[in-house]
Image (cartoon, rainbow, N blue to C red):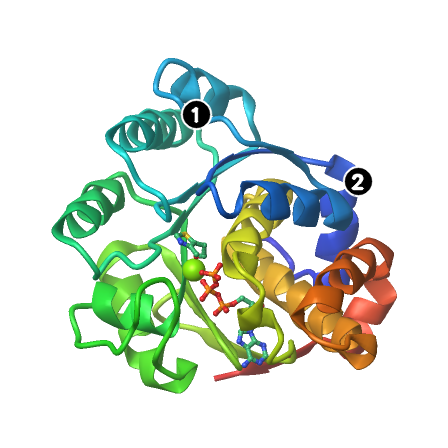
Amino acid sequence: MQTTQTPGQLLTAMRAKNPLVQNITNFVAMNIAANVMLAAGASPAMVHTKEEAGEFASIASALTINIGTLSPDFLAGMKEAAKAAGETGKPWVLDPVAHFATAYRRAAVAELMKLKPTIVRGNASEIIAQAGSQSSGHGVDSGDPTEAAEGSAIALARQSGSIVAVTGEVDFVTDGQHSVRIMGGSALMPRVTALGCSLTCLVGAFAAANPEGPFEATAAALAMFAVAGEEAAISAAGPGSFLPLFLDRLATLSPETLDTKARIVSA
Ligand SMILES: Nc1ncnc2c1ncn2[C@@H]1O[C@H](COP(=O)(O)OP(=O)(O)OP(=O)(O)O)[C@@H](O)[C@H]1O
Ligand SMILES: Cc1ncsc1CCO
Ligand SMILES: [Mg+2]
């Protein structure tokens, strides 16, 4: 039986492994997400075309898929990669960006869910809509508080078998039976584009280092963002200066500080 590890221990394990994580993410997120992962201690590779995405997934330690700037070629690559991850037993994370906005996105997420993501990470509006309820999302931004998505997250986790993470002012992680809330972060975070997408990639890195415990891995990645975001915001003058301070804090955050400052409570 696996003993539960603290977020700090999981951060140590992630940095020691420096996991190769394949990210099929959107054009907006590619650069910032790769920088977030390098700062935190992972090794990102943005590889998405169908000719190589499946082959690459079988050598990577984890895969993340984000539908933010979807196209037929991206979708074909996503399906190849998710199949290969499933066949080779690698954890993979789905970020269903604005999937409620168009029929094309809805159909894509339905197809990807059939390939059984280990973890689904979205904002409150995305998770509410994915569980079949009416959300107030406007495009890629959430219009709902996390609290309103907790029931949807639990329902989605039970129905899909995936760990479900909802982010916002408060974060929520559930496997359908057990749930936690994570406090922290900053109101500046949703004012910088693609930080949620970057967090999805970091969840992949933590899952790669702890494949037996995707729930704890997800909570640890979210706690790292919460602590680094809260601390970076202290000296930030606005969204522009927040981003470099946040990258620096991800890089300097020690496992001990993460364990001291993380606010994770059972829900
Ligand atoms: N109001 C807030 N206060 C504190 N932290 C926040 C707030 N809103 C978001 N966050 C944090 O920002 C990070 C990104 O979450 P968010 O819910 O904004 O993702 P998202 O909507 O998918 O982002 P994007 O689509 O731009 O990538 C998470 O770590 C979350 O906890
Ligand atoms: C702004 C934006 N548009 C499509 S994806 C993306 C990044 C945040 O989700
Ligand atoms: Mg998002």
Distance of label 1 from label 2 (alpha carbons): 22 Å
Q: Which residue is mark 2?
A: 16
Residue at the (33%, 54%) spot, across then down: 96
Residue 88 disc label: 1
Residue at the (49%, 20%) spot, across then down: 56
What type is the residue that disc 1 sits on?
Answer: Thr
Q: Position of residue 158 (x, y in %)?
A: 27, 64
Mark 1 neighbour density, 10 Å: few (under 14) some (14–19) many (20 or more) = some
Ligand 2 - quadrant of the structure image: bottom left
Q: Splitting the image into 4 quarters, where does residue 114 fall?
A: top left
Q: Position of residue 225 (x, y in %)?
A: 66, 65
Looking at the rendered structure, the secondary structure element under dot 2 is helix
Q: Position of residue 118 (x, y in %)?
A: 40, 48
Residue at the (34%, 20%) spot, across then down: 50
Report the front residue among 63 and 70: 70
Residue 67 disc label: none
Q: Splitting the image into 4 quarters, where does residue 71 fall?
A: top left
